[in-house]
Image: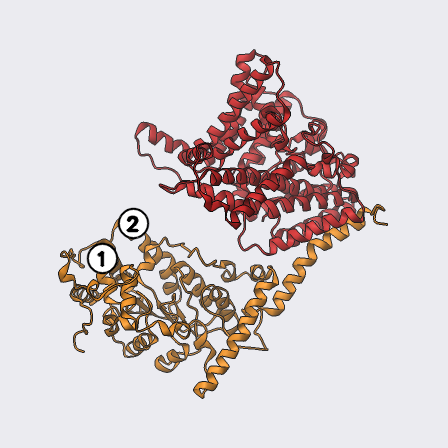
């Protein structure tokens, strides 16, 4: 079930909400949590019923290991448990890739296994690895135990399939606070609004950018096709914006749905395309993944504690692993490597150069760097990525793109860029409601207003005018959904 | 007043209503219109069937649910001109409906037929398949026309998906239904007797009748040229010699064998095997123009022989099943006459009528013992074909 499918919106979600609040109304908090766990497993099973067993085994295994590590920290046990988790990901996600490359390098012809990837394995595995590590280091609070709470932390359906990657410390205490399980009208209404904003981002913007991006990237796969400079830029910019609106739309929907249950999920995006540097970009893009990579990979590799050279190596290694996490393909590795190189350059510049770059130029450099990297991220093959990049930077004329449809697409793409750069994001729009709720983690970086700061202080008013905007958005989104003849899955589902 | 703060409860209620109301209204309107009779028979205009490219995929779900046919015609547009009333009168079948799907693959035909067999007490199935259908992957779905598989999985909840859409599309189909009824009534008045609406469900001849009788145009389509002159339709004697093959020992190419066997295993065999009480009349070799086959043999002999070897595969694989009668009409007299075709593969309804007549007389059957001879005869006819030639014995 996708969050914007009719069976989710009108069947699953109402049933889960009613059951949950009925249980809490009669004081059965544990039952309510258990009910959410079962519903979440049902949600997962709707996608792939055959992998519910794998999910349950993963939960049991990690919970038992975590409890053992908590009682008696044992480095060997930690390593074994982490290796087992990574081994599962390696098998399901990378076995085919490894065998394929082994065949290429050694000339062997080993059969390439055709293994179906369990949905969300990267997400729920990373969450549990963090829990294992923190049990070992003793960074688990007393209100973070309990098998049912642990299960819900792993499988809670709003974040199960595509994040945000939640940390046990921000989730498990919520399941034990009695006040959290009670109905909170502020959270409920805020959750609805955030959900609607996410829905509009997905069906109104991301899904309409997809055909523009797909056109260019599909063209690049065909032999002897010439892609004009305009087409190449349109396709890559369209994908840049599609990915953001798709993923941040999903994150908004996840946060909104969680709030309906009075549960707070961490922020995942904070206007990344307003960044003035790559370091800033990674403090705003997929923030929960960045947090995990920083705490459990970068710092473990030494971080900035072992000298500059080691720091840059750790940065590069972390970003390469981050790329590989996204998928078993060299294009993802290259994407991660590019960002690693960008970060190193950024750090070197910051350290050794006294010059400040004019903000608009800094923004442009950052944005173009990100766009270039996204070309590798999206392209199915290395060569098709190079074809697009070549067309982007070596002029290839084609006036066909400037017909009526082409102009419309161009305006749409630039419109979305303007929205990203100049307008407030969801949490800024919700700032009048967000503060009382404190739904976002204290560590969340304060949003830096890049350009035209006044626009970014606009927020939704909880009055008739404000409500009219949201109602219009809701109805427009539902009408767009009704008009859809194909189902567009979220891009991050493939991870 | 506009600036006064609203309570959270009011905001929540209004937002929930705004999420529900558009979908609820759209679905309610669509359910009321229900042009494909998915949920109930249209009491205002019963027995009107929308067919043709795209609509057929939705219509047959309603037809099978509401009308519970005892006999069906299955296939793609090559079978669409078989008229249910003709099958009833010539073959003495009961309650015949056409569930052909234009442009469809074997997989799509299988899904629709499978649904029909499960939910109706069927007695007879006429299924026209061409050998080329077996060259695609077994789960291939024709990409240009969406196939609503959810309508054929037996899950009534899923049926709602069809109508959770903007009402304008469903309203348009509803208007088409009314138009179709008017056309049928008009035709009935013109011919002086009622026209069976089932006979106008999938047939396309009434729309394309003017496109027949143009032999040169058909030849141009076969040769994939914009037009052809008489000398282009030259006998094969003027081209290089064609390869020979031994149909008794020749084997399908590896890729083709995989797809043929998978299509057979997944799309054909389960139905034949699981419904032994149903009589399957299988036409495996439609009467395409001999020029088409000749051109194929000259330009892609491997494909030509793969298609003919597919016939051999099917006949042999289906021989253990007594509920299957196989027919091959490749040597039909019409195959010599390009005027009987609209293009390289779509024939005049007279060809369908002749096929029915032969089926009723049990002529042109194919089985294990005669398939080889049939293929040899067919190959000889293809090789020796010359334009404006009449078939032997005419």
Label placed on residue B8: none
- Name the N-terminal-most of marks 1 and 2: 2
Q: Nearer the viewer, residue A195 or B252?
A: A195
Q: Nearer the viewer, residue A75 or A444?
A: A444
Which chain is depicted orange?
B
Q: Residue at x 72, y 48 (%)?
A: A470
Q: Is residue A222 left or right of residue B389?
A: right
**Residue B137 appears at what percent x and percent y?**
36, 53
The correct choice, above or below, for A19 with respect to B376 in the image is: above
Report crowding for label 2: few under 14, some 14 to 19, many 20 or more residues within 10 A (C-alpha): few
Circles 1 and 2 in contact, beta carbons < 8 Å:
no
Q: Which residue is mark 1?
A: B305
The correct choice, above or below, for B365 with respect to B89 in the image is: above
* Residue A6 in view here: no
Which chain is depicted red?
A
**Residue B91 appears at what percent x and percent y?**
35, 79
**Label 2 residue SS:** helix
Q: Mark 2 — on which chain does it sit?
A: B
Q: Which residue is mark 2?
A: B255
Q: How many marks?
A: 2
**Residue A270 appears at what percent x and percent y?**
66, 33
């Amino acid at each position: 079930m996708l969050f914007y499918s009719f069976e989710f919106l009108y069947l699953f979600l109402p049933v889960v909400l009613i059951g949950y609040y009925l249980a809490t109304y009669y004081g059965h908090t544990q039952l309510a949590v258990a009910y959410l766990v079962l519903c979440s497993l049902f949600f997962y099973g709707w996608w792939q019923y055959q992998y519910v067993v794998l999910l349950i085994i993963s939960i049991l295994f990690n919970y038992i290991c975590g409890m053992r590590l908590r009682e008696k920290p044992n480095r060997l046990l930690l390593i074994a448990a982490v290796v087992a988790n990574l081994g599962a990901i390696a098998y399901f996600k990378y076995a085919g890739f490894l065998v394929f490359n082994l065949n290429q390098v050694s000339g062997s012809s080993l059969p390439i296994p055709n293994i179906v990837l369990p949905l969300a394995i990267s997400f729920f595995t990373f969450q549990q690895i963090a829990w294992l590590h923190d049990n070992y280091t003793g960074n688990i609070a007393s209100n973070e135990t309990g098998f049912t709470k642990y299960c819900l932390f792993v499988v809670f359906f709003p974040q199960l399939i595509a994040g945000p990657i939640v940390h046990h410390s921000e989730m498990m205490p919520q399941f034990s606070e009695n006040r959290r399980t009670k109905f909170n009208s502020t959270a409920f209404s805020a959750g609805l609004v955030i959900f609607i904003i996410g829905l509009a981002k997905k069906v109104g913007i991301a899904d309409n950018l997809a055909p523009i991006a797909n056109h260019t990237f599909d063209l690049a796969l065909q032999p002897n096709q010439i892609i004009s400079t305009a087409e190449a830029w349109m396709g890559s910019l369209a994908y840049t914006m599609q990915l953001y609106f798709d993923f941040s739309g999903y994150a908004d929907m996840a946060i909104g749905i969680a709030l309906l249950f009075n549960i707070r999920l961490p922020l995942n995006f904070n206007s990344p395309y307003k960044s003035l540097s790559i370091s800033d970009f990674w403090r705003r893009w997929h923030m929960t993944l960045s947090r995990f990579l920083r705490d459990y990979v970068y710092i473990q590799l030494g971080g900035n504690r072992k000298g500059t050279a080691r720091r840059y190596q750790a940065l590069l290694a972390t970003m390469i692993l981050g790329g590989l996490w996204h998928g078993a393909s060299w294009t993802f590795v290259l994407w991660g490597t590019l960002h690693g190189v960008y970060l190193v350059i950024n750090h070197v510049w910051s350290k050794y150069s006294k010059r400040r770059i004019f903000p608009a130029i800094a923004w442009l450099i950052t944005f173009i760097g990100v766009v270039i990297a996204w070309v590798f991220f999206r392209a199915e093959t290395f060569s098709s990525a190079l074809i697009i990049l070549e067309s982007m930077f070596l002029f290839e004329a084609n006036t066909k793109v400037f017909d009526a449809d082409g102009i419309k697409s161009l305006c749409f793409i630039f419109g979305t860029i303007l929205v990203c750069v100049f307008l407030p994001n969801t949490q800024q729009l919700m700032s009048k409601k967000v503060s009382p709720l404190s739904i976002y983690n204290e560590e969340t970086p304060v949003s830096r207003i890049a350009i035209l700061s006044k626009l970014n202080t606009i927020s939704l008013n909880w009055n008739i005018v404000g409500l009219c905007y949201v109602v219009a958005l809701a109805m427009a989104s539902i009408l767009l959904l009704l008009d859809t003849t194909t189902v567009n899955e979220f891009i991050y589902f493939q991870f | 007043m506009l600036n006064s703060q609203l309570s959270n409860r009011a905001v929540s209620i209004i937002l929930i209503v705004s999420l529900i109301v558009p979908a609820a209204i759209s679905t309610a309107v669509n359910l009321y219109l229900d042009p494909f009779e998915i949920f109930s028979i249209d009491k205002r205009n019963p027995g009107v069937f929308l067919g043709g490219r795209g609509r057929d995929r939705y219509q047959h779900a309603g037809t099978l649910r509401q009308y519970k046919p005892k006999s069906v015609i299955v296939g793609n547009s090559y079978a669409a001109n078989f008229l249910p009333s003709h099958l009833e009168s010539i073959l003495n079948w009961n309650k015949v409906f056409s569930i052909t799907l234009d442009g469809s693959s074997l997989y799509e035909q299988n899904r629709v037929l499978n649904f029909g067999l499960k939910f109706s007490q069927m007695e007879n199935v006429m299924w026209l398949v061409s050998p080329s259908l077996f060259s695609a992957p077994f789960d291939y779905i024709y990409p240009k026309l969406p196939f609503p598989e959810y309508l054929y999985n037996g899950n009534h909840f899923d049926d709602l998906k069809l109508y959770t859409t903007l009402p304008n599309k469903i309203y348009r189909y509803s208007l088409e239904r009314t138009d179709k009824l008017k056309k049928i009534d008009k035709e009935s008045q013109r011919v002086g007797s009622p026209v069976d609406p089932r006979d106008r469900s999938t047939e396309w001849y009434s729309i394309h009748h003017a496109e027949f009788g143009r032999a040169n145009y058909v030849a141009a389509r076969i040769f994939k040229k914009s037009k052809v002159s008489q000398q282009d339709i030259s006998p094969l004697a003027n081209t290089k010699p064609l390869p020979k093959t031994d149909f008794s020992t020749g084997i399908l190419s590896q890729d083709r064998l995989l797809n043929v066997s998978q299509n057979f295993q997944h799309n054909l065999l389960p139905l034949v095997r699981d419904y032994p009480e149903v009589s399957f009349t299988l036409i495996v070799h439609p009467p395409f123009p001999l020029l088409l086959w000749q051109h194929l043999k000259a330009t892609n002999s491997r494909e030509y022989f793969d298609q003919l070897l597919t016939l051999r595969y099917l006949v042999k694989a289906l021989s253990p099943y007594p509920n299957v009668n196989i027919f091959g009409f490749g040597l039909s007299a019409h195959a010599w006459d390009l005027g009987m075709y609209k293009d390289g593969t779509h024939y005049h309804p007279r060809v369908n009528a002749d096929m029915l007549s032969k089926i009723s007389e049990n002529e042109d059957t194919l089985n294990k013992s005669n398939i080889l001879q049939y293929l040899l005869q067919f190959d000889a006819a293809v090789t020796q074909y010359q334009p404006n030639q009449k078939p032997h014995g005419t």
